């Protein structure tokens, strides 16, 4: 079952983000989720299996300087490593696409790290109809 995330999901989201390579404390995740759920243009969906959150996708919508239509961008997508390759990631991504389209988005983008351990994710995105188009760069604005 896929549903909107609730604040009570923060502990499972902490574990899931850790499995994606972004460890944090439960308190940090609770604080982040509190900020995210307040944003009208941010959406978090979770996949439940037997009453347990086993996956999540987060995305936001917005506008670009390069196109007229609204876009959506996936911020995070993760499925519990113990049950990957069972279609849950695809269900989450399709549900997010459907929601984004219903909100008026004309397309959806995402970034995925260039690390070796992300190669399976890259193949997944290609199977889901995504095309590798750009290279992302990041810079910390805090010293």
Image: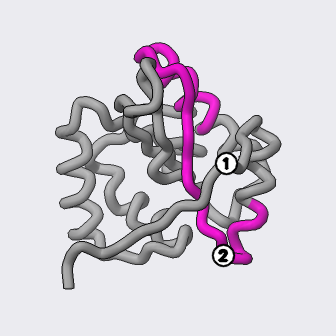
Q: CA distance from mark 1 to mark 2?
A: 17 Å
The reply to whether residue 96 is in sight is yes
Please provide percent x and percent y for residue 32.
24, 58
**Which quadrant holds residue 69?**
top left
Horizontal side of 122 relative to 106 (left or right) equals right
Task: Give the answer, above or below, for where 39 lies relative to 35.
Answer: above
Question: Given the current orientation, which residue lies at the most extreme front position?
Answer: 66
Horizontal side of 99 relative to 79 (left or right) equals left
Q: Tell me the element at label 1.
A: loop
Which residue is denoted by mark 2 in the rendering?
A: 115
Q: Does the magenta run of residues contain 94? A: yes
Q: Does the magenta run of residues contain 132? A: no
Please provide percent x and percent y for residue 47.
54, 42
Task: Give the answer, above or below, for where 137 lies relative to 70.
Answer: below
Work out whether mark 1 precedes mark 2 in sequence or the reverse, and give the earlier one: 2
Please provide percent x and percent y for residue 30.
23, 60
| Of 105 and 34, the residue lying toward us | 105
Which residue is denoted by mark 1 in the rendering?
A: 133
> What is the magenta range?
93-120
| Of 50 and 42, the residue lying toward us | 42
**Which quadrant holds residue 123?**
bottom right
Q: Tell me the element at label 2.
A: loop
Q: Give neighbour class at mark 2: few <14, some 14-19, many 20+ (Cα, 10 Å).
A: few
**Which quadrant holds residue 49?**
top right
Which residue is rendered at x = 77% and y = 48% of the image?
A: 86
Label 2 near label 1: C-beta < 8 Å? no
Task: Give the answer, above or below, for where 24 lies relative to 40.
Answer: below
Which residue is rendered at x = 73% and y = 43% of the image?
A: 131
Please provide percent x and percent y for residue 143.
20, 85
Which residue is rendered at x = 54% and y = 43% of the image?
A: 48
Horizontal side of 62 relative to 125 (left or right) equals left
The reply to whether residue 52 is in sight is no
């Amino acid at each position: 079952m896929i549903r909107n995330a609730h604040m009570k999901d923060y502990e499972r989201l902490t574990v899931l983000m850790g499995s994606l390579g972004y460890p944090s404390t439960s308190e940090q995740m609770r604080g982040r989720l509190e900020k995210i759920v307040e944003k009208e243009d941010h959406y978090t969906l979770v996949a439940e299996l037997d009453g347990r959150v086993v996956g999540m996708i987060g995305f936001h919508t917005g506008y670009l300087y390069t196109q007229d239509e609204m876009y959506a961008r996936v911020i995070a997508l993760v499925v519990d490593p113990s049950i990957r390759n069972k279609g849950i990631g695809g269900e989450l991504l399709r549900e997010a696409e459907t929601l984004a389209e219903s909100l008026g988005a004309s397309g959806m983008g995402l970034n995925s790290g260039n690390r070796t351990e992300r190669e399976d994710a890259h193949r997944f995105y290609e199977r889901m109809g995504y095309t590798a188009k750009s290279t992302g760069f990041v810079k910390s604005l805090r010293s």
